[in-house]
Amino acid sequence: MTAPALEVQGLAYAYPDGHQALFGVDLRIERGERVALLGPNGAGKTTLVLHLNGIHTPGAGTVRVGGVQLAKDTVRDVRRRVGIVFQDPDDQLFLPTVREDVAFGPANLGLRGPALNAAVDRALAQVGMEGFADRPPHHLSLGQRRRVAVATVLSMEPDILVLDEPTSNLDPASRRELSTVLRGLDPTLLLVTHDLPYALELCPRSVLLDGGVVVADGPTRELLSDEALLAAHRLELPYGFDPSRVPAR
Amino acid sequence: MSAGHGSAGLYRAGHSALHRLPAQCKIAAHLAFVLVVVCTPRETFWPYAAYALLLAAVAAVARVPAGFVARRLVIEVPFVLFALALPFLAHGPRVDVLGVGLSESGLWSAWGILAKATLGVIASVLLAATTSQRDLLLGLERLGMPRTIVQIASFMLRYADVIAGESERMRIARESRGFTPRHLGHLPVVAKSAGALFIRSYERGERVHLAMLSRGYDGAMPRLDSSATPASAWATAALLPLLASVALALAWAGR
Ligand SMILES: Nc1ncnc2c1ncn2[C@@H]1O[C@H](COP(=O)(O)OP(=O)(O)OP(=O)(O)O)[C@@H](O)[C@H]1O
Ligand SMILES: [Mg+2]
């Protein structure tokens, strides 16, 4: 049996100012799974995500990626396998052109010349931004920047793709285009979102985080149909949305 | 303002032969040209006219209009003021100009400073007008400037944009809520905003850094291109300093 793509055990974390954000999180994701991470504001979702590639060091507990435990000597390897797309694309894009930004990750992995160009072109094609390679990222629209931000991580060919709130501020068309892009990708996907219909559309499984612990984990449709559970954790479906009537993908 | 427009003042996008020349060639040619100008004896006037003609030719090739250059000459103003003061302040034999006794050596110095500074500034404006800030930095790196310094300069450029962007968003947020700074009583608000601006920029910098770490950044920017500069580019760029040094040689020979 192969190791799960991601295995988090008993993860607890307090910020340097003393605020405890995670209180023992357990999460196991198999290879190729698409999982939504749901939870109200301040639940600890972003904090959890920042543990998945060693940006934060756990106060207690472990993170394993593809069977490799995250530690000082494995952090480089883990960062190659876990691609994180941050909540705000302006945090992600920092170079003068789209091409350089998308090349940054694979270049750090040692790619050069034609191999690097190929990785950049492929990642841009995957998100439908081929024509924008030489534009400055800060002159793109937010939806375009978001897609470029996804490309900056795809170009590293991660095993696990983690997206923190990818649909915030996207117009409906960009939101749908992004879901087409995401559905077309192979890597294991962890999607942090408040957008419950989006979770249902993309992820067969959902994990609900609140107060720094996992409070529910199961098929997305079941979770979203549990009104009491949603209400208890400040999650709300859009008006008139009935998860049981959405056709399966 | 807007992020990324910091360079708009000097750079003038285009596709001329000069724009296409690799930055390192242009920088080297610029340095050599300025060296030639500085070495030119100030007692012979015609080489300066020759240099000016050469620069005019360069500007024509680069399609940079004279007005564009003239407006950017204002950075020279402090030198001009200094030069104008010299004939009054310097010691030594005096000459009469319109009834005012001026120092002769001061006059020569003033002329020398004005002519050399003006030519140097025009050359620099032409370099900056045809080379983006980023290419300038890459060119310096290829000429052997330490990578760490080039990186710091690149990040300064980038963060200047970030900070300008943050401050613009904060200004819009202030003014949308009816605040327009009109008198000193408004100073505390502006000062508090400046404090918040610092924190916000700092925290954004932190987040950008985290995102860089996530993509395998280990403290050194990956060097992307290793292609050698073609000899023809060096030859083209060498034209300006070569022609200028011919004038210089003739000037020294003719003394
Ligand atoms: N840098 C920090 N220092 C101290 N506490 C923090 C810091 N960042 C987040 N927190 C706290 O940790 C808790 C979890 O925050 P986190 O950002 O993980 O929430 P989240 O689930 O991502 O929320 P959102 O949906 O709003 O993005 C919150 O209570 C927050 O106030
Ligand atoms: Mg968050």
Image (spheres, coloured by chain):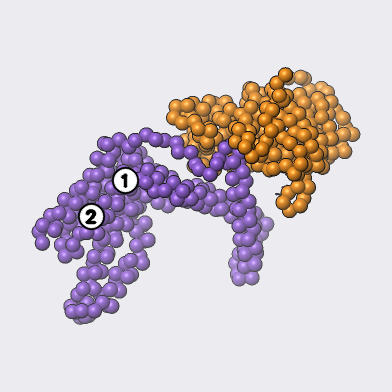
> Which residue does the image show at 53% across and 25% down from the upper left?
A122
Q: Nearer the viewer, residue A84 or A178?
A: A84
The residue sitting at the right extreme is A228
Discs 2 and 1 lie in a common subunit: yes
Q: Is residue B208 left or right of residue A228?
A: left
Q: Is residue A125 left or right of residue B115?
A: right
Q: Is residue B178 left or right of residue B98?
A: right
Report helix, strand or loop for mark 1.
helix
Displayed quadrant of residue A159:
top right
**Where in the figure is residue A105, as x and y percent of width and height?**
55, 35
| Residue corresponding to mark 2 | B36
Q: Nearer the viewer, residue A210 or B131?
A: A210
Displayed quadrant of residue A30:
top right
Query: Which quarter shows the C terminus of chain B?
Result: bottom left
Letter of the chain in purple: B
Q: Please identify which colour was used for chain A in the image.
A: orange
The answer for which chain carries disc 1 is B
Amino acid under disc 1: Lys
Q: Is residue B56 above or below residue B80?
A: above
| Residue corresponding to mark 1 | B26
Q: Earlier in the sequence, mark 2 or mark 1?
A: 1
Amino acid under disc 2: Val
Q: Which label was assigned to residue A167?
A: none
